[in-house]
Image (cartoon, rainbow, N blue to C red):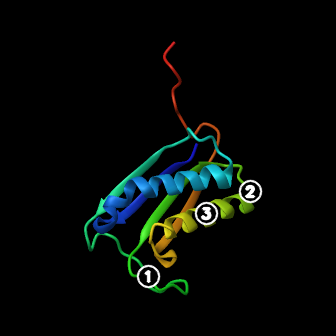
Amino acid sequence: MPLVRVDIHEPLAALRPQMSEAIHSALVDGWEMPADDLFQIFQVHQPGDLFYSRTFPDADRTDVVFVQILAYTGYSPEVKQRGAELIADRLAALGIKRDDILIALSENGDGDWLAPSKEA
């Protein structure tokens, strides 16, 4: 059950629904997760709220889109990279420069999630 947090500047705010779909479909396709496993937080920031290198590593950034993914441990490095590449591809298809995308993945394990089921 990945939890995805996306931090963007105000000019991209109108693209949130498309960005959400792009990221989610990339994880469904790349990680083979269930299509109804959708948990995302978008935070819109004013200019000056996000600080980032315009050049590291070998980038030419004009803005930044931070994508943080918290996921249950167990995905192979290849699967994680495949999902990240699909996210970058699908965000780029929306007109977001690949150099402006930064994806960070953190993992946790048993006992670190609580998602209560239907009421009994």
The CA distance from mark 1 to mark 3 is 19 Å
Which residue has dot 3 on it? 86
Quadrant of image for the N terminus:
top right
Element at badge 1?
Answer: loop
Which residue has dot 1 on it? 61
Q: Earlier in the sequence, mark 1 or mark 3?
A: 1
- Identify the residue at image location x=67%, y=64%: 81
The residue type indicated by label 1 comes to: Arg
The residue type indicated by label 3 comes to: Leu
- Counting from the top left corner in percent of width and height, residue 70 is at 55, 52
The CA distance from mark 3 to mark 2 is 16 Å
Dot in front, 3 or 2 = 3
Q: Give yes or no for contact between labels 1 and 2 (Cβ–Cβ under 8 Å).
A: no
The residue type indicated by label 2 comes to: Ser
Q: Is 39 on the left or on the right of 109, as rendered? A: left
Q: Is 86 on the left or on the right of 120, as rendered? A: right
Seen in the picture, residue 51 relative to 56 is either above or below; the reply is above
Element at badge 3?
Answer: helix
Seen in the picture, residue 73 relative to 104 is either above or below; the reply is above
Which residue has dot 2 on it? 76
Dot in front, 1 or 2 = 1
- Quadrant position of residue 11: bottom left
- Counting from the top left corner in percent of width and height, residue 85 is at 62, 66
